[in-house]
Image: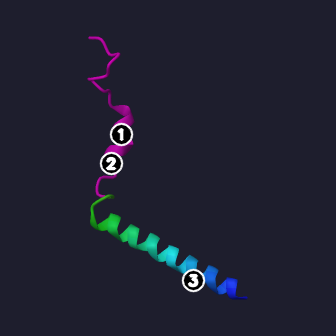
Amino acid sequence: MNIIYLLIGCSVLLALIFLAAFFWAQRSGQHDDLYTPSIRILLDDENEPGNKK
């Protein structure tokens, strides 16, 4: 029965760590630009090593 209490405590601690990481990512601007990554695959790179002009 004691192991259940240990596992519940560990899971709550892990959930709090993930919640803190999520709030840190929100405050540091990780999710500000949602448009550019979706169109990045459509843009051609001009400085590719194998790209000859």
Q: Is residue 20 magenta?
A: no
Task: Find residue 48 and report its image quarter.
Answer: top left
Give the extent of the magenta segment.
Answer: 32-53
Which label lies toward us, 3 or 2? 3
Q: Which residue is mark 1?
A: 39
Instruction: Determine the secondary structure under disc 2.
Output: loop
Residue 39 higher or lower than 32, as above or below: above
Label 2–label 1 contact, CB within 8 A: yes
Instruction: Determine the secondary structure under disc 3.
Output: helix
**What separation in Å lies between label 3 and label 2 (alpha carbons)?**
39 Å
Kind of residue at badge 2 = Tyr
Residue 15 is left or right of residue 41, and the answer is right
Q: Position of residue 17 (x, y in %)?
A: 45, 73
Q: Position of residue 53 (x, y in %)?
A: 26, 11
Residue 45 higher or lower than 53, as above or below: below
Task: Find residue 1 and report its image quarter.
Answer: bottom right
| Labels 1 and 3: the sequence-earlier one | 3
Q: Residue at position x 69%, y 88% from top? A: 2
Label 3–label 2 contact, CB within 8 A: no
Q: Position of residue 35 (x, y in %)?
A: 33, 48
**What separation in Å lies between label 1 and label 3 (alpha carbons)?**
43 Å
**What separation in Å lies between label 2 and label 1 (alpha carbons)?**
7 Å
Kind of residue at badge 3 = Gly
Kind of residue at badge 1 = Ile
Label 1–label 3 contact, CB within 8 A: no
Q: Which residue is mark 2?
A: 35
